[in-house]
Amino acid sequence: MTLYFSHDECLSHLTPYGHPERSDRLRAIAWALSDEAFADLDQRDAPLGEDAEILRCHPPAYLDRIAGAVPVSGRRQLDADTTLSQGSLKAARRGVGGCVAAVDAVLSGEAVNAFVGCRPPGHHAERKTAMGFCLFGNAAIAAKRALDHHGLDRVAVVDFDVHHGNGTQDLLWDERRAMFASTHQMPLYPGTGAASERGAHGQIVNVPLAPGSGGAEMRAAYDEHVLPALRAFAPELIVISAGFDAAADDPLAELQWETADFTSVTRALCGVAREVCEGRVVSTLEGGYDLSSLGAGVAAHLAVLMEEAR
Ligand SMILES: [Zn+2]
């Protein structure tokens, strides 16, 4: 079985008019999933993530600062890109809670895999810094939940968002039980993600991709770097930071992935999951700002997850 976690409160994180990270992203995904191909998808409300889950990756002072900065009305900018509105904290907690519930369901054997379709995204949030539209490091929190609550020895996070997951890298930098692999356009925001950034235990794999490159270059990056490192690490769970902004039509970047490329990268990761961890995958939504590419990309990604879980 494949589980899908989201929540209507994720629509209440309001960003300024014209901001790419907007509520319509989740409406575009809901529309794509209204296709009868997804009639069997088990869709559940993401629970609110508790403080203790956020504190697996962020210090208490950071959580207090975010909670204290939530405005009663209107918006507050945390930086040039990252906004809080009245509903932002609850929305971000749904993302954390969805990831925790997804990990619990997959590790208990209730589901083979799960996708968390919440916003704001998470992979740019560093230990003490909200940035790049992100408040809490959902993917790293999922990894820590699996390690510290469920007692796994090895978890991998693979990030195919077009931007480098600097936040996940920061949160897992000195965690030898967690491998982090990222493919991303370089140069591009946030500027990190050079191949020389390897983590405190050599457990981080960064594979920068050139602007203008497409599916062939992506497959080479996975075949030559990411998949062999994943197999060697042999994780007991694979967490995916699933961003769909490497799509050709995305307004924030210049990679040229087609919908079929999201199918292909998902198949490749699920294939390794089948080899090393009985197919266990938890995937969480990161970026993707062209609404039609986003809907198609998430549908393609979920179609593979559902096929793998049959
Ligand atoms: Zn992105």
Image: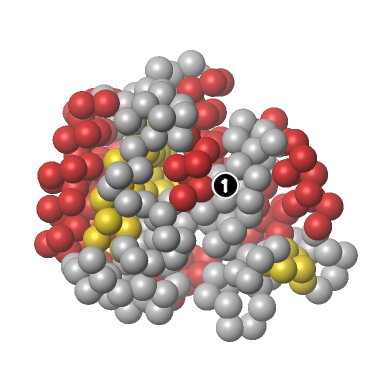
Q: Quadrant of the C terminus?
A: top left
Near-viewer residue (67 or 40): 67
Q: Is residue 115 visible?
A: no
Label 1 amino acid?
A: Glu
Residue 274 figure quarter = top left
- Placement of 6 over or under 84, stated as above or below: above
Furthest residue to the front?
A: 196
Residue 198 figure quarter = top left
Residue occupying image coordinates x 62% and y 31%: 56
Q: Quadrant of the N terminus?
A: top left
Q: In this view, does 59 lie to the left or right of 294?
A: right
Residue occupying image coordinates x 30% and y 44%: 196
Near-viewer residue (34 or 136): 136
Neighbourhood count class around disc 1 (C-alpha, 10 Å): few under 14, some 14–19, many 20 upward:
many
Q: Where is residue 200 in the image (x, y as percent from the top left)?
A: 41, 30
Q: Is residue 29 visible?
A: yes
Residue occupying image coordinates x 77% and y 71%: 75
Furthest residue to the bottom?
A: 18
Q: Which element type, helix, strand or loop, lies under badge 1?
A: loop
- Placement of 78 over or under 136, stated as above or below: below
Q: Where is residue 182 in the image (x, y as percent from the top left)?
A: 33, 48
Near-viewer residue (266 or 56): 56
Near-viewer residue (237 or 11): 237
Q: In this view, does 35 lie to the left or right of 267?
A: right
Q: Mark 1 points at which residue?
A: 126
Q: Where is residue 38 in the image (x, y as percent from the top left)?
A: 37, 57
